[in-house]
Amino acid sequence: MAFSHTINGCTYRFDDLKMLLAKATPARSGDELAGVAAESEIVRAAAKHALANVPLKHFLDEAVIPYEDDDVTRLIYDTHDSVAFAPVAHLTVGELREWLLQEPRSTDSLLQVSRGLTPEMVAAVSKLMRNQDLILAASRCRVVTKFRSTIGLPGTMSVRLQPNHPTDDPQGILASVIDGLLYGCGDAVIGINPASDSVASTIKLLRLLDDFRLRFDAPVQSCVLTHVTNTLQAIQQGAPIDLVFQSIAGTQKANEGFGISLSMLREAEEAALTLRRGTIGTDCMYFETGQGSALSANANFGVDQQTCEVRAYAVARMCRPLLVNTVVGFIGPEYLYDSKQIIRAGLEDHFCGKLMGLPMGCDVCYTNHAEADQDDMDSLLTLLAVAGVNFIMGIPGADDIMLNYQSTSFHDALYVRSILGLKRAPEFEEWLRKMRIADGEGRLASSGDAFARLMPPGLLQGEA
């Protein structure tokens, strides 16, 4: 079906829904690279006007990637909840934006409708929103998940402690873990990106983290961010698996490029659930996404990168994840050129994920060849915290020495928690008090006693 809109006597035509969504997208380098971006701001404005008038029901009749060609499309249509859709089924995309921004719009009403919204509907409405709209609407979407700690409660913001090391050295990893805990980070997950992708190395790191957790009876979950097939093998070998990690994308071909299928993700979740390692909940999956992943795999099929990204969230909500993380600036300037594009993409991803009912966090990050710096990340971090982001990254000095990119530090988490009065996960907060790392008001200890209490025997002598 074609769409059109007239501006100053000139009519702009868009051949199908896929083209309309792409042309309505705010400018970004990835869409220009793919050849799907609007040719001018006038074309972009015309596309937004046309998109605003599209009935939401139309998205159920026209797929951006054919149903018979793509299992993510089949997942989207086969799991669509018509009962959840009913409250908004009569709306256009523009009217959905107004509905989302109405006062008051409760968290419950947004969660109830989330299963009735397809990724393309959610991507469409985000394209009509200013940044402040994305922040306001997302702040009303609260998604709470549990494993050993409760993540996403109002007034909280958790942190993934990321103690990566270029050689997977246990001493270096534990030193970063202790450093992060002393800054009150780690309540989302202690998650390592391994330098080695072997199953043996994965199991060694998992046992390192689990031994540390058990030694101090810490209410945290750990994860080694290896491929899901490695995690399945580690489960079979009796490794202490808390969370199953996998990078995911919004098309079947892109997921095949990651070496995964939808059935494989379901299998992994079922395997992790049989371990029964969660103490207060059973949300045991950890997914990472990022705009540009489908395009970088030549698997976007002419769909703009933001719509592809939101389709990945349909894959994520197929399972029950504890955490979903958009690694917003990690792929590079070929997809998000500068800080303006990175900031916009971070706010889009967070809003779209939350509206689809997911526990969204964000790796507020950039690569060193992007037109961005740490001041820009301060801005995005603050905006996301105001929007109610579930978690961010905590990396020593904000500089990942293994993955070689810039993110957020333990100090950044302190800043945003302080300025907005955000708490940690309640179970983790109580543990910090018990360990005398924090006082009754959540203020961190200033003495070296807490460091000594967390020091494993032999760490300073090079043992782990």
Image: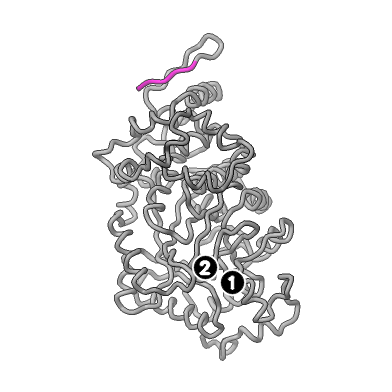
Q: Main secondary structure of the magenta part?
A: strand
Horizontal side of residue 287 vs 407, given as left or right: left
Query: How far across and how far down the image is residue 424, in percent?
Result: 63, 66
Is disc 2 placed on a helix, strand or loop? Answer: strand
Is disc 1 placed on a helix, strand or loop? Answer: helix
**Residue 2 in magenta?**
yes
The amino acid sitting under disc 2 is: Val
Quadrant for residue 73, please give it: top left
Answer few, some or many: residues within 10 Å of disc 1's Cα (few below 14, many 20 plus, some between 14 and 19).
some
Horizontal side of residue 125 vs 314, given as left or right: right
**Residue 128 in magenta?**
no
Asked whether residue 134 is in view, the answer is: yes
* Residue at 48% in and 29% down: 91
Give the labeled residue for mark 2. 189
Query: How far across and how far down the image is residue 454, in percent?
Result: 61, 83
* Residue at 52% in and 37% down: 126
Marks 1/2 in contact by CB < 8 Å: the verdict is: no
Quadrant for residue 244, please give it: bottom left
* Residue at 47% in and 13% down: 11
Instruction: Tell which of 235 and 440 is nearer to you.
Output: 440
* Residue at 51% in and 85% down: 464
Question: Mark on residue 427?
Answer: 1
Looking at the rendering, the stretch of residues picked out in magenta corresponds to: 1-5
The amino acid sitting under disc 1 is: Glu
Quadrant for residue 395, please give it: bottom right
